Image: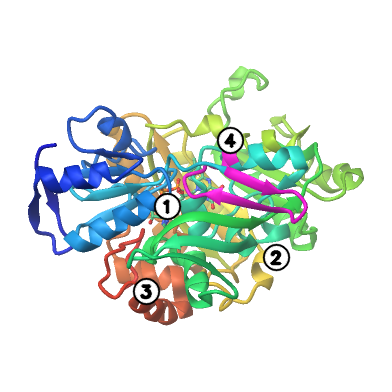
Amino acid sequence: MNWIKIETLDEKRIELDGETLRDLDNDLRGNLLKTGDEGYDEARKGWNGMIDRKPALILQASGPADVIKAVNFIREHRLKSSIRAGGHNVSGAAIADQGMVIDVSRMRSVHINPEEKTAVVESGALLGDLDHETVPFGLAAPVGVVSQTGVAGLTLHGGVGWLTRKHGLSIDNLKSIEVVTPEGNLIKASAENHPDLFWALRGGGGNFGVVTAFEFNLHPVESPLAAIITIYPMDKAERVMNFVREYMAEAPDDLMLITEYARVPEMPEIAEEEHGKPALIVAGCYSGPQDKAEEITSPLRTVVEPIADLSHNLPWIEIQQIFDEDYPEGKLYYWKSIYLDSISDEVFALLEKYTRSQPSPDTTTDIWFLGGYVERVPKEETAFFNRHHPYMVGIEANWEDSADSEANISWVRELHGELEKLPGGGRYLNFPGDLDERELVLRAAYGDNLERLKKIKAKYDPDNIMPGLLNIS
Ligand SMILES: Cc1cc2nc3c(=O)[nH]c(=O)nc-3n(C[C@H](O)[C@H](O)[C@H](O)COP(=O)(O)OP(=O)(O)OC[C@H]3O[C@@H](n4cnc5c(N)ncnc54)[C@H](O)[C@@H]3O)c2cc1C
């Protein structure tokens, strides 16, 4: 193996000789890749086509032993590093440019204990891997709504999906987390064992080590479940949103809803003359008693005459894949988020105006209706802080041509700037936007929990070798 140049934590470039690399490689069951190696170009890609980074080394771990070796290696050589699981975070933080990537994406096993209703999930698993194993037992873990997303990044920064109002964030459903600490020790953190680390990992992400496995509590789900997808014309959006807001204020936690300011999708079920027009999409899932499903969901599907109502009863595994097609790998994405304390006519007018002028027809601005279980968990229970806002807005610019990047990014930032003037604030790190204003984003994401997080970071990672998505130092 030839020598390489690689960046250190102090932003210096050092050489690692062939023997050092060979020794590491020989010690692994997984792969060690560098520029020019077969598989390197595939391994350095994230899901977001905007990200084009060239790590000096990618260590594809096959299990915790490889992860320990990787962590020891980056510590001993003081290397700039990153951790990659599903590779879905829009920021591209999973790929350290000129540094070393600890890649867990091959560790995808999921083991279910049907009696205890728990799942042990290796940290490279995708949501679809997890759902595939839980479904035969009529069980589910509360994760996100697109099946190709990585369990690890999603969970470590919160995790919202169709069961959020009923069972909480993904982190609220963790029993334990197995992690290789920056010192190279494998620890199982839980409420009883290293409770400070367990607290910090639930929201604090990759700042405290490389997670190798999660233990989730699972919940019974009926199948099929009622999925709502109703597309309303944009000129009725304000009226529909006023109804939805009042309805959700009284709705059971079994009902989870996302409203999308978007364009009418080009689907054969929808009249062709409607395709591409600005629209409001009401998307939801009702996971309560199925004999109540029609009564609970029909008011949301009939507020005014819809352009199309594609609502169906679907098996859980299909509900988890409803949006998959909309997010192909390699497309260009820039997403930013903010929480709101209320949604008023002012918000609806703003979102309508921006949707009408959005540079890309594939872009959506989504309002996630939170509350329920999420806000009943005290803010100091986990590192994740922003539980008290009833709404989260994800501004998701999605486009094809890099010539349009500037227009799309500016559009997101401008709309985000307008929303920042309204009551609310904060940042959801799974839709993070710009991370360069580190102190500001840290405060927005962790609020009053930040000081405690910093102390735990100093205890477990005194030399700050684990940068996380956003470095808590
Ligand atoms: C199409 C799409 C749909 C999405 N839908 C949802 C949704 O419904 N709900 C939701 O909440 N979010 C959603 N997200 C956001 C998603 O949760 C984040 O992008 C998340 O970070 C993805 O996790 P990953 O493992 O794929 O990320 P990666 O990009 O691999 O990792 C992101 C960061 O997480 C940390 N990390 C990853 N693995 C580990 C590990 N093993 N140990 C320690 N730290 C680690 C690292 O700091 C890394 O930089 C979606 C994203 C996309 C692209």
Would you say the residues marked 1 and 2 are in contact, meaning their CB atoms lie under 8 Å apart?
no
- Give the mark nearer the N terminus: 3 vs 4: 4
Q: What residue type is labelled 1?
A: Pro
Q: Which amino acid does label 4 sit on?
A: Phe
Q: Mark 4 points at which residue?
A: 323
The reply to whether the C-beta atoms of the residues labelled 3 and 4 are less than 8 Å apart is: no
Magenta span has 336? Answer: no
- Mark with earlier residue (3, 1): 1
Task: Give the CA distance from mark 3 to mark 1.
Answer: 18 Å
Question: x%, y% of residue 434?
Answer: 33, 56
Residue drawn at x 46%, y 32% as measured from the top left: 361
Q: Nearer the viewer, mark 1 or mark 2?
A: 1
Mark 2 vs 4, N-terminal side: 4
Give how far apart the Cα atoms at labels 1 and 2 are: 33 Å
Query: Which circle, 2 or 3, is nearer the viewer?
Result: 3
Tag 2 or tag 1, which sits nearer the N-term? 1
Q: Residue at x 39, y 34 (%)?
A: 399
The tag on residue 373 is: 2
For label 2, the SS is helix
Classify 460 as above or below 369: below
- What's the CA distance linking mark 2 and mark 3? 30 Å
Q: Can the viewer see residue 145?
A: no
Distance from the alpha carbon under mark 3 to that under mark 4? 38 Å
